[in-house]
Image: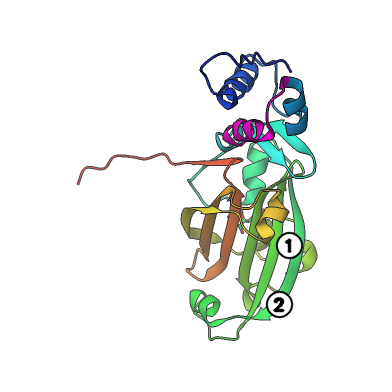
Amino acid sequence: MRLAINKNLPIPIYYQIEEGIKALIEQRELKPGDLIPSERELCEAYGISRMTVRQAVNNLVNDGYLVRQQGRGTFVSKGKMEQRLKGVTSFSEDMRARGMEPGTKLLSFERIQGSKSICEKFSVPEGTMIFEVKRVRLADGIPMAYEISYLPATLLPGFTLEVAEGSIYQFVENVLMLEIGNAHQVLEASLARGVECEILGLESGAPVLLIQRQTYLADGVPLEVVRSVYPGDRYKFVIDMQRTVS
Ligand code: GLP
């Protein structure tokens, strides 16, 4: 990778690095998935400070050109994954629709006595048995989301650890033969913290999208309450809208 850095120009160095890397990506000299030199290598190659390199790389990560993977390095982004907010789709379906292989790393699978706030969402008495499943969702082996799902135990006979390692929606529809109806979903911006950083390979404070979904069966019975954390640099959500004149 060769960047034209000119310290005599009245243009900040970090900006020159940023624009130089962007140009290489646009000219396809750097391709999606390529590993870029480490911050230390860039400092040495161009005789600039770590702070300057870091600022340029941070901006490119935040703008979605580069992706940092903890312990592996910084790569040219494969583009943000686009998800249309239409229809109640599962993670597995969303990834397959993009030609990627969905995967799951099961972090925990428990049958717990539901707290007041969770049980209220399912309209069941406090203490009712609820499955609590913590999963990292992968696309072609790359962590794309961290999900904590709650599902009422009585609704899901035969729900096991092995099932949770695959598609929950597929189990509900094809094994239990229940019909998934509709969902209510809330999206908000947040910052990665604590265990989420480690799980998704993000730095503390990195931008994330927090998504809370409550899904109902076709007969109106609540099926799941899910809190998902999506890295902001790997995802964008697209909404198609129709103007309705009232
Ligand atoms: C998405 C939704 C979750 C849902 C999951 C099911 O990730 N946000 O609410 O539980 O899909 O996916 P799968 O059927 O692959 O387990």
Q: Nearer the viewer, residue 224 or 175?
A: 224
In the rendered image, which quarter is residue 172 located in? bottom right
Residue 114, image x and y in percent? 60, 80
Residue at the spot of label 1: 164
Mark 1 C-beta closer than 8 Å to ligand 1: yes
Residue 39 drawn in magenta: no
Name of the residue lying farthest toward the front: 8
* Residue plotted at (61% across, 14% down): 6
The magenta stretch is: 46-59
Q: Is residue 68 above or below residue 16?
A: below
The three-letter amino acid code for the residue at tag 2 is: Arg
Residue 241, image x and y in percent? 37, 40
Residue 53 drawn in magenta: yes
Mark 1 crowd level (few <14, some 14–19, many ≥20, 10 Å Cα): some
* Residue plotted at (69% across, 39% down): 68
* Magenta stretch secondary structure, dominant: helix
Residue 46, image x and y in percent? 71, 21
Residue at the spot of label 2: 111
Q: Nearer the viewer, residue 129 or 137?
A: 137
The three-letter amino acid code for the residue at tag 1 is: Ala
Numbered mark located on residue 68 in the image: none
